[in-house]
Image: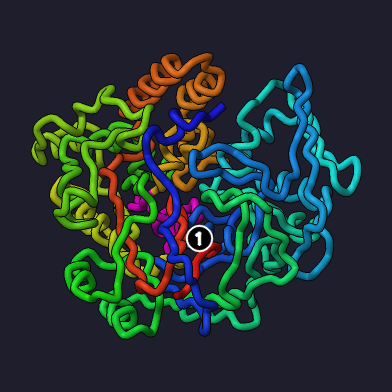
């Protein structure tokens, strides 16, 4: 079971307070997301922008509250058998999809099964479940081979991939094929007819949505949509996005360029703040299926030269409040973060040592393709530092730039670099996702079913199960230390440090929900 202490320790979430006299929204809420919406399927994609889209248009059976505890959301509640093996979940009355069809238990069953093929915790359910069934229209029955107290947490977590509740006809789509029908179950509906990829995505308040009666608490409680329409404006150029925010052409910018923050702070009509206090862990990910990073010695060769501070300064600037290092395999500042083996990144840095290690590993000058997302400044800056590092160490580097949508598509290619494949890429993972082994996709080692890179590391899988079975927090921490030591040996990825990117919005917006995702319920204009 994932407790608050084990999930995120003392990280605080909540909402940005709204004045008592909030006025109705007279125009759409205009939001500049971090990148183009390259997919509409939050089960197929792990991209944050796709997850945020998913949380707008789909509801979940459970939602995490401000203390990261799972609370019933679409579920009215549940009962667990005395032996812990059978969960009986009852749906709330009055739930509807955006085509006004009722949400039935069999829709939820199909959605859970599809999610269980892709998500890191869903895959655990896939292995544990003897049965996922719908005895009637409001009842879901999950029969397990072993007790799993954290099941509700897994079904309600906001981290990719989310267990989005879709109509059965949509959820029957193969989990490795993207959906084309975005009929949702959440407070906003997606206007596919108005979607212009690379320019605008439009969402409208769904009149048939029935919020819960409890107060909003992160992903739990009432999801009250106060705007009739939300428009995502795709503006890749940071200067253009910054000007649009200052000129009141947009209301909210998810990823302002750090260099522009001083200018934005001088504008009294703009607020700067951290929506996600857990931050994002920078990751250099390797492709285990193709040379040269199918060779563990070549993956290890980079470690003596990695300078996390250089990566963080490039990604987010030198403001100490916006980055944290050194960082191991788990989110810094959370209970499972530890320094086991961390000396591989905190000891003296040496390009020469890395070069020698690369030669000893037998690197044969194979072409290395490092993907770069040019429309996401944090990722582009991380990638630039990684590219420079790889060249100095001695890799024969190809460094193609592309937009984030193309990047997401390309990294699904498991072939050789000459066939459109890849060798490595930089990205970030939200702190909540990588704070515990259960939801830590970059630390999975289950081969073809793993996240992009597809490592096969049986020891990581065994230790992950030991963590799930840990009887107390002390045991869980010991297992986390073992996991980190194995990760330094096998190098499924290299942590690059933690960033806490601020967001920027017009002061006329209030009620922004903090805790992780960019969420659109509760937000008002005054």
Residue nearest the observer in this picture, 67 or 415: 67
Residue nearest the observer in this picture, 105 or 362: 105
The answer to whether residue 521 is seen in the rendering is: yes
Would you name the residue on which mark 1 appears?
Answer: 519
What quarter of the picture does the N terminus occupy?
top right
Q: Where does the image place residue 22, in percent across and percent down from the top left? A: 49, 72
Residue at position x 16%, y 40% in the image: 305
What quarter of the picture does the C terminus occupy?
bottom left
Q: Is residue 484 magenta?
A: no
Residue 339 lies, with reference to residue 518, above or below; the image says above
Q: Where does the image place residue 376, in percent across and percent down from the top left? A: 34, 65
Secondary structure category for the residue under label 1: loop
Residue at position x 51%, y 21% in the image: 462
76 on left or right of 521: right
Residue 119 lies, with reference to residue 213, above or below; the image says above
Residue nearest the observer in this picture, 226 or 367: 226
Residue at position x 48%, y 71% in the image: 21
Q: Is residue 415 magenta?
A: yes
115 on left or right of 267: right
82 on left or right of 240: right
Residue 41 occupies which quadrant of the picture?
Answer: bottom right
Q: Which residues are magenta?
A: 407-428
């Amino acid at each position: 079971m994932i407790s608050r202490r084990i999930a995120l320790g003392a990280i605080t979430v909540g909402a940005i307070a709204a004045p008592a006299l909030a006025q109705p929204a007279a125009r759409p809420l205009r939001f500049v997301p971090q990148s183009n919406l390259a997919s509409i399927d939050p089960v197929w994609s792990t991209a944050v922008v796709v997850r945020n889209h998913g949380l707008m248009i789909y509801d979940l059976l459970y939602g995490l509250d401000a203390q990261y505890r799972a609370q019933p959301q679409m579920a009215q509640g549940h009962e667990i058998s005395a032996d812990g093996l059978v969960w009986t979940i009852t749906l709330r009355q009055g739930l509807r999809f955006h085509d006004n069809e009722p949400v039935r238990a069999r829709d939820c069953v199909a959605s859970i099964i599809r999610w269980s093929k892709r998500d890191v915790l869903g895959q655990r359910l896939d292995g544990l479940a003897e049965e996922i069934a719908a005895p009637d229209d409001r009842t879901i029955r999950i029969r397990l081979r072993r007790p799993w107290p954290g099941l509700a947490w897994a079904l309600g977590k906001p981290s990719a991939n989310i267990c989005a509740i879709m109509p059965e006809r949509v959820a029957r789509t193969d989990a490795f094929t993207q959906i084309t029908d975005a009929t949702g179950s959440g407070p906003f509906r997606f206007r596919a007819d108005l979607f212009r990829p690379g320019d605008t995505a439009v969402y409208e308040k769904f009149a048939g949505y029935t919020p819960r009666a409890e107060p909003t608490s992160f992903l739990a409680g009432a999801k009250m949509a106060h705007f009739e329409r939300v428009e995502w404006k795709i503006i890749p150029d940071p200067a253009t996005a910054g000007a649009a925010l200052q000129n009141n052409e947009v209301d909210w910018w998810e990823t302002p360029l750090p260099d522009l923050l001083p200018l934005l702070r001088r504008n009294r009509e703009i607020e700067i703040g951290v929506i996600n206090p857990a931050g994002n862990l920078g990751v250099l990910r390797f492709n285990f299926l193709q040379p040269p990073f199918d060779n563990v010695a070549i993956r290890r060769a980079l470690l003596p030269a990695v300078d996390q501070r250089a990566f963080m300064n490039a990604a987010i600037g030198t403001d100490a409040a916006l980055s944290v290092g050194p960082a191991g395999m788990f989110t810094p500042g959370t209970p499972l973060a530890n320094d086991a083996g961390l000396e591989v990144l905190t000891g003296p840095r040496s390009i020469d040592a890395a070069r020698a290690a690369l030669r000893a590993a037998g690197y044969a000058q194979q072409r290395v393709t490092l993907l770069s997302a040019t429309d996401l400044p944090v990722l582009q800056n991380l990638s630039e530092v990684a590219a420079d590092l790889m060249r100095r160490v001695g890799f024969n580097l190809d460094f193609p730039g592309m937009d984030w949508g193309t990047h997401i598509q390309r990294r699904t290619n498991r072939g050789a670099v000459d066939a459109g494949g890849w060798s490595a890429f930089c990205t970030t993972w939200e702190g909540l996702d990588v704070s515990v082994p259960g939801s830590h996709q970059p630390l999975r080692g289950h081969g073809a079913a793993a996240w992009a890179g597809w490592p096969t590391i049986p020891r990581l899988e065994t230790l992950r199960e030991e963590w799930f079975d840990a009887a107390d927090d002390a045991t869980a921490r010991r297992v986390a230390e073992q996991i980190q030591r194995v990760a330094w040996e096998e190098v499924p990825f290299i942590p690059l440090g933690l960033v806490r990117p601020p967001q920027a919005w017009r002061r006329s917006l209030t009620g922004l929900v903090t805790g992780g995702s960019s969420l659109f319920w509760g937000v008002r204009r005054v």
